[in-house]
Amino acid sequence: MDEIKKDLLRLGVATLYEAAGRRGLMAGAELLVGVPFAGQAHTAEIPAGDNLGLHNGLRAPERTGDIYCVASAGKGRYGVIGELLVEQLRAGAWQAIVLDDAIRDIDLLEAPPSVAARGICSRGTVKRRAGRVNVDISLGGILVRPGDWVVGDRDGVVVIPEGRVLNVLAAAETRLAKETRIAELVRTGATVLAANLTATEELAASS
């Protein structure tokens, strides 16, 4: 698992997204606090303006990963987490939290954990409805299942189904090798289009 995490971090969101067939990129999720992250998803789903389900997910007896993925119907209209919840996540050794909503107390937030969200909003939440924990969720328009791989960096957040991660990694390594060759050719004076054609032909000849 640690090697998979290292490889996902090294390859990055943009390359993994392309290698996955341009699938899995969350809409609206930005890395707002902390460093790039990669790990498996633990999920929760909450209604708009109510973060009780998020708290319940932190108490769930079965933890399926160290990336806490929270689907919120608020879609950026509520500051679902702030300084205190980030402190609790840190104490629980969570690597990151990914939210389909906003955060607040931004000047007080420090990693770990890294925080990816739709933005910043001071509007707070109530704690009335339990939400759902450890279920399949739609986060940023992408299906996230407990245990799926989630990678975040400055290019966004991408989700890779648990059963596809090794195939996506292999495709991403091939893509990285091609892009490295394109960069070499561009440095010698070739245009990007011409270098891409050459690299593609070389890759086909070697396979």
Image (cartoon, rainbow, N blue to C red):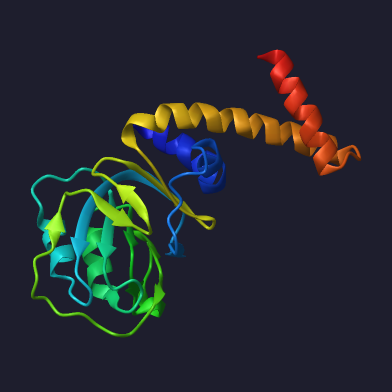
Tally the marks: 0
Q: Is residue 116 left or right of residue 11?
A: left
Q: Is residue 189 left or right of residue 100?
A: right
Q: Is residue 203 visible?
A: yes
Question: How far across and how far down the image is residue 90, in percent?
Answer: 27, 60
Q: Is residue 103 above or below residue 196?
A: below
Using residue 13 as the reference point, say whether residue 75 is left or right of it: left
Q: Position of residue 12 (x, y in %)?
A: 53, 45
Identified at 26% across, 40% down, the residue is 147
The residue located at (48%, 35%) in the rendering is 7
Q: Which quadrant of the rendered structure holds the N terminus? A: top left
User: Could you tell whether 176 is left or right of 26 in the image?
Assistant: right
Q: Residue furthest bottom?
A: 123
Q: Which residue sits furthest right?
A: 189
Within the image, what quadrant is residue 18 found in?
top right
Q: Which residue is rendered at x = 46% and y = 39% of the image? A: 8
Q: Where's residue 126, x and y in %?
A: 15, 80
Q: At 81% from the left edge and 41% from the top edge, which residue is drawn? A: 193
**In this view of the protein, which residue sits in the foreground, 187 or 170?**
170
Residue 92 in view (yes/no): no
Q: Position of residue 108 (x, y in %)?
A: 36, 77
- Where does the C terminus fall, quadrant-wise? top right
Work out whether 171 lies above or below 72: above
